């Protein structure tokens, strides 16, 4: 735990009684999620080389309400499954994106309103592109905020959104003149979407219904990486390798950019 943006860290050991007594053999932490300084979750899967977030033999979900000092198991799934994403948007509301069974074209969401103890299955329209994303090591692109949910294939070829906890789904509109979103798309809170394509940075603040061009800066090229915190603050980077990367930062939604070259010091 850190309280000063990573300058100092505190570490401690906790015991998880009866961890994986039936659901998962040789468990490891697949995912960790905190929504504030008190409430957080750990998702355990088997140590079988399946990849981060992929649990073909089952899953266990543990919760803390005191900042990680103690943990309680809130759910246990013993049957085979592949969980690509476990995320919480509040101390009570959470989502589990999963692919279970054969054939793998059946994709579903599990939604909880009590911190992970009881989950309700939400059906998702079958799409081969998104099903393939669930089977990849990267998993699908997904974002959740309150009642808003957005799921996309990792290549952006299919994007669908729900505004009512997954009861109804609609296909999103890509950037005008395109058939799909780009590989480097960034999604925030299920509504704000950033997409760098064709030497321009596009933004949608209503889940892809309408788009506006935020920037046509000369450094914008295909296959760049994007990371935005909100509507205004974000980064774009590229470069020949991992040791020297060119980065650009904006604090006004892409209207102006600051650039520098970053060097990783080991």
Image: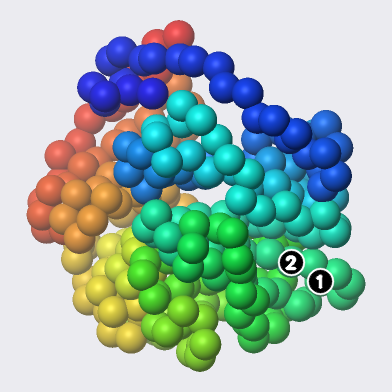
Q: Residue at x 41, y 49 (%)?
A: 224
Viewer-closest of 179 and 46? 46
Q: Is residue 254 left or right of residue 136?
A: left
Farthest residue to the top: give it: 266
Res. 104 mark: 1
Expressed as whole percent of the image width and height from the top left, the position of residue 252 reads 10, 54
Are circles 2 and 1 on residues that touch, CB within 8 Å? yes
Asked whether residue 178 appears in the rendered view, the answer is: no
Q: Which residue is nearer to you in this view: 244 or 65?
A: 65
Residue drawn at (78%, 39%) of the image: 20
Residue 232: quadrant of the picture: bottom left
Is residue 92 shown above or below 208? above
Compute the Cα span from label 2 to label 1: 7 Å
Q: For the residue carrying disc 1, how many other residues have a C-alpha within 10 Å: few (<14), some (14-19), or many (20+)?
A: some
Q: Residue at x 68, y 41 (%)?
A: 44
Disc 2 or 1, which lies upstream in sequence? Answer: 2
Measured along the vertical axis of the image, is residue 202 above or below residue 220? below
Secondary element type, mark 1: loop
Nearer-the-camera pick, 40 or 202: 40
Image quarter of the C terminus: top left
91 vs 139, nearest the viewer: 91
User: In the rendering, at what x and y percent does residue 136 appear?
Assistant: 72, 55
* 169 lies left or right of 218: right
Q: At 33% from the left edge and 86% from the top edge, which residue is drawn? A: 209
Q: Which residue, given by chain and number where applicable, does mark 2 sit on?
A: 99
Circle 2 crowding by C-alpha within 10 Å: few under 14, some 14–19, many from 20: many
Question: Can you see residue 226?
Answer: yes
- Dot 2: what SS? strand
């Amino acid at each position: 735990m850190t309280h000063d943006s990573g300058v100092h860290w505190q570490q401690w050991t906790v015991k998880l009684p009866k961890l994986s007594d039936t659901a998962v053999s040789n468990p490891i932490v697949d995912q960790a999620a905190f929504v504030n300084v008190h409430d957080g979750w750990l998702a355990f899967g088997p140590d079988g080389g399946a990849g981060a977030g992929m649990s073909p033999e089952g899953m266990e979900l543990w919760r803390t309400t005191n900042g990680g000092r103690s943990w309680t198991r809130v759910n246990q799934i013993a049957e085979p499954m592949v969980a690509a994403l476990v995320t919480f948007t509040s101390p009570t509301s959470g989502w589990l994106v999963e692919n279970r069974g054969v054939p793998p074209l059946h994709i579903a969401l599990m939604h909880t309103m009590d911190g992970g103890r009881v989950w309700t299955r939400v059906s998702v329209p079958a799409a081969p592109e998104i099903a393939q994303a669930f089977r990849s090591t990267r998993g699908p692109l997904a974002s959740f905020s309150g009642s808003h949910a957005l799921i996309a294939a990792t290549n952006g070829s299919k994007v669908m959104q729900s505004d009512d906890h997954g009861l109804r789904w609609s296909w999103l509109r890509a950037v005008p003149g395109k058939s799909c979103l780009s590989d480097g798309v960034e999604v925030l809170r299920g509504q704000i979407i950033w997409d760098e394509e064709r030497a321009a940075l596009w933004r949608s603040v209503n889940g892809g219904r309408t788009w506006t061009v935020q920037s046509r800066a000369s450094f914008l090229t295909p296959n760049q990486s994007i990371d935005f915190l909100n509507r205004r603050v974000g980064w774009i980077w590229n470069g020949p390798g991992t040791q020297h990367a060119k980065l650009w930062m904006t604090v006004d939604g892409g209207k102006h950019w600051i650039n520098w070259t970053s060097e990783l010091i080991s």
